[in-house]
Image: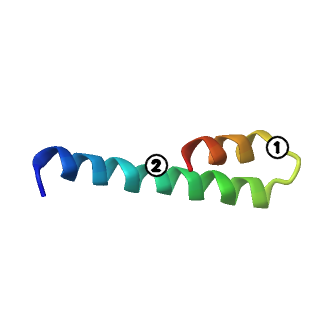
Amino acid sequence: MSGAGFILAINLFVAGLFAVAFLLVGFNNRSDRTAYWFAAAYA
C-alpha cells in the first residue's frame, strides 16, 4: 500500500467514526434532526 493509500484509508476510517458518532447522537436525542444530516454527510 502506498503512502497516499494509507492516508486515504485512515481518512475513510475517521469519517466512518464521525458518521457512527453522529448517528448515536441522533438516536439518543430524537429532537436533534441535524445530527442525522451530519451522519449522512460523513457516510
Q: Position of residue 39 (x, y in %)?
A: 64, 48
- 18 above or below 37? below
Badge 2: residue crowd in 10 Å (few <14, some 14–19, many ≥20): some
- Relative to 34, does residue 25 appear above or below in the rendering? below
The residue positioned 28% from the left and 47% from the top of the image is 8
Residue located 73% across and 47% down the image = 36
Q: Position of residue 17 (x, y in %)?
A: 48, 56
Name the residue nearer the viewer: 1 or 42: 1
Gap between marks 1 and 2 measured at Cα: 19 Å
| Residue 42 falls in image quadrant | top right
- Residue type at mark 2? Ala
- What colour-coding does the image apply? rainbow
Residue 11 % position (x, y): 34, 47
Identify the mark nearer the N-term, 1 or 2. 2
Give percent across and percent down for residue 41. 61, 41
Q: Give the residue at mark 2.
A: 15
Residue at 11% x, 51% y is 2
Disc 1 secondary structure class: loop
User: In this view, which residue lies farthest toward the right?
Assistant: 31
State whether residue 35 is above or below residue 23: above
Name the image quarter holding the N terminus: bottom left
Q: Residues within 10 Å of mark 1 (few under 14, many from 20)?
A: few
| 26 vs 43, nearest the viewer | 43
Q: Amino acid at mark 1?
A: Arg
Residue at (39, 56) in percent of width and height: 13
Residue pointed to by mark 1: 33
* Numbered mark located on residue 4 in the image: none
Kind of element beneath mark 2: helix
Left or right: 30 in relation to 42: right
- Total marks drawn? 2
